[in-house]
Amino acid sequence: MKEFASAARDGLSPSQLEMVLREIGAARYHNLHPFHHQMVSGALTRTQMQAWALNRYCYQSVIPRKDSMILARAEDPAFRAEWRKRIEDHDGSDGWNGGIARWLKLATGLGLDAEMVKSERLALPATRFAVGAYLSFCTNRSPLEAVASSLTELFSPVIIGERVPAMLAKYDYVSEDILAYFKPRPGQASRDADFALAYVMEHATTPEKQQAVIDALVFKCDVLWAMLDALDYAYGGKGHIPPGAFNPEEG
């Protein structure tokens, strides 16, 4: 795996910085993970699909919270006006007609109970730790680093383009209605990534800031990778489901 720990040591031009950020996605984004490969090949069981939807809900539900933390520290009203679109995308106009609600529809369409999913109590411990680390990062690191961590959206349309057609083709219990979450996401992600990338290019003006931006994107890729690692370990071939986590065999 390519190392990015000293990529900005001597300073980078904006185009060089963008190239490094895109290289991070090419090397570390979770569309490379074996669990994703199993999903798009049609190899996952219904239980594995349910576990994925349940655990991913924890991540989806934290997105507007982390974006609120970024928004709260932003002094530029133009930045705030743009960034709050992300919260509206996920919460909708009343909290339950946006992306989070559409993800809940995906989870219930796979056979899960809505209140159980919303409680997050049966999610894997590793999922909760990873999601909590992401929220903490966006709360406590610099606004520039927090914005840079969202740049995984540069690569989001790629994984959606792989995932949705495969799920519709390979799993007969999956319908376009169940996958409604994904329909607006490529456009939303591209809009958000363009804004965040322009912000990073404008504000990452020193080698130190550029390296912080690079490290932030690596961290975010690690969060997403760790979540799939946990799913693979718990619900893969060996089935090491931790106590208290989602386990259909235990009812």
Image (tube, helix red, strand yellow):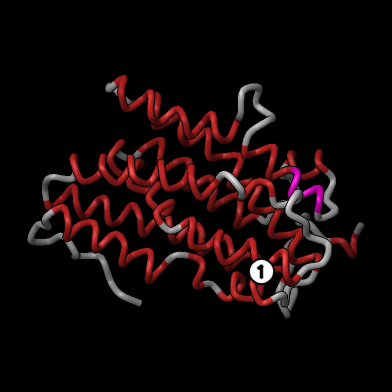
Q: Position of residue 200 (x, y in %)?
A: 25, 44
Q: Is residue 222 above or below residue 81?
A: below
From the image, which quarter does the C terminus lie in? bottom right
Left or right of 125 in this view: 107? right
The residue that label 1 is drawn on is 166
Looking at the image, the residue that sits furthest to the bottom is 237
Name the secondary structure under disc 1: helix
Q: What residue do we see at 19% from left, 64% from top?
A: 7
Q: Is residue 64 above or below residue 207?
A: above
Is 229 magenta? The answer is no
Q: Position of residue 197 (x, y in %)?
A: 29, 46
Q: What residue do we see at 73% from left, 39% from top?
A: 118
Report the front residue among 123 and 88.
88
Q: What residue do we see at 64% from left, 65% from top?
A: 165
Q: Position of residue 141 (x, y in %)?
A: 33, 40
Q: Residues within 10 Å of mark 1 (few under 14, many from 20)?
A: some
Chief SS of the magenta region: helix
Left or right of 217 in this view: 50? right
Q: What residue do we see at 12% from left, 57% from top?
A: 12
Report the front residue among 33 and 138.
33
Report the front residue among 227 and 110.
110
Q: Is residue 25 above or below residue 143?
A: below
Instruction: Name the image quarter holding residue 136.
Output: top left
Residue type at the position of mark 1: Ala
Left or right of 150 in this view: 227? right
Left or right of 240 in this view: 198? left
Q: Which residues are magenta?
A: 105-109
